[in-house]
Image (cartoon, rainbow, N blue to C red):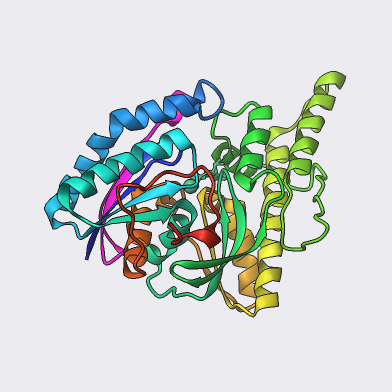
Amino acid sequence: MLILGIESSCDETAAAVSENGINILSSVISTQIEEHKKYGGVVPEIASRRHCENILGVVSKALEDSGKTLDDMDAIAVTYAPGLIGALLVGVNFAKGLAMASGKPLVPVHHLSGHIAANYIAHPELKPPYLCLVASGGHSHIVEVLDYTKFRIIGRTRDDAAGECFDKCARAMGFPYPGGVHVDKAAQCGDRNAYPLPRPKVTGCEYDFSFSGLKTAVINLLHNSAQKGTEVNRENLCAALQYTISDILCEKTIAAAEMLGYKNIAVAGGVSANSGVRSEFEKACGERNMKLYLPPLNLCGDNGAMIACQGYYSYLAGHRADESLNALATLSLEDIGCL
Ligand code: KG4
Ligand code: ZN
């Protein structure tokens, strides 16, 4: 079964063709990072305009690279939530137009379920149920993947997402947007014990995260040293920040896995590209005889392949949309399939 997947929830216009979900025949990503960099973050209106300009070319190229035509597709899958509303609307309307004109089924895909599905592409042996940490620019969830389209959220962030914490601290340190990858690079040469950073506590739910206190601590440290005229060692601060975020994400995910009895752990989303996150999970899972699944680096960030893959499983589960499909800026992973 051939699925065309379309993604436009943030600053990447992407499309891919998958065969039976996990066999990726093509994947095209047009990123807008260089343009948003000038403003230090994503400017929603610019993102929507670029999606409008790029989407036809990206989808055409994905079909061309796959060696297939629109006619060959069995369904068209599209990210409809969550994300920047103006950005999502471009992909949703484009996919609706394609589906209605060609008579193909339209499959709505939740962006985070797409991130989770990226692991099926790289690890076809991975099958639900298992526990997955989804950490991106907008979300940090510990998710029980009950089935390919059924999810239970075990923990979530109370404030900032892990990626947001990386990006905001990176910005305060003078790195360009998106800063997570720059923190990762600088951290390689730093001493993670040089700056003691707080590990914010969340009362009430031991599997929830809170990253805003950590972000504030890093920003205050930078302000204080600027006022005193002392130098901050950026490499050391990056190493300390990366270690603190990685350790918190890993500790809570492992605790949730132990509580629920899961031996299979996956990590997904943009932050799963972080070398500290990857090594903390490798260490923790290795020590406990747990099997760890990490996406390859090219599938960690936003891409169309993960949407085409999840689109396949959502299609099999009977998820369909018609011409009334709308984009949603927010939607819980637990509520997918109820259109
Ligand atoms: O999943 P994603 O591409 O987009 C969203 O759905 O949000 O995640 C983007 C986030 C950004 O915050 C970015 O800085 C972060 O993932 N990220 C990283 C790394 N690569 C991407 N954070 C830390 N280290 C990295 N190597
Ligand atoms: Zn994403």
Q: Quadrant of the N terminus?
A: bottom left
Q: Relative to 208, is 189 above or below?
A: above
Residue 51 can be seen in this image: yes
Q: Nearest the camera: 241 or 338?
A: 338
Q: Quadrant of the C terminus?
A: bottom left
Residue 68 can be seen in this image: no
Q: Relative to 147, is 8 above or below?
A: above
Residue 109, by quadrant, is bottom left
The residue positioned 38% from the left and 61% from the top of the image is: 310
Total numbered labels placed on residues in the image: 0
* Residue 3, image x, y percentages: 25, 58
Q: Relative to 22, is 64 above or below?
A: above
Q: Nearest the camera: 2 or 96?
A: 96
* Residue 261, image x, y percentages: 64, 80
Residue 318, by quadrant, is bottom left
| Residue farthest to the right, as pictured | 228
* Residue 103, image x, y percentages: 17, 53
- In-image side of 208 versus 86 (left or right): right
- In magenta segment, residue 17: yes
- In-image side of 37 versus 25 (left or right): right
- In magenta segment, residue 126: no
Q: Main secondary structure of the magenta part?
A: strand
- In-image side of 114 versus 22 (left or right): right
- Highlighted range, magenta: 14-35
* Residue 97, image x, y percentages: 24, 42
| Residue farthest to the front, as pictured | 324
The residue positioned 34% from the left and 47% from the top of the image is: 324
Q: Relative to 329, is 123 above or below?
A: below
Residue 59, by quadrant, is top left
- In-image side of 280 versus 63 (left or right): right
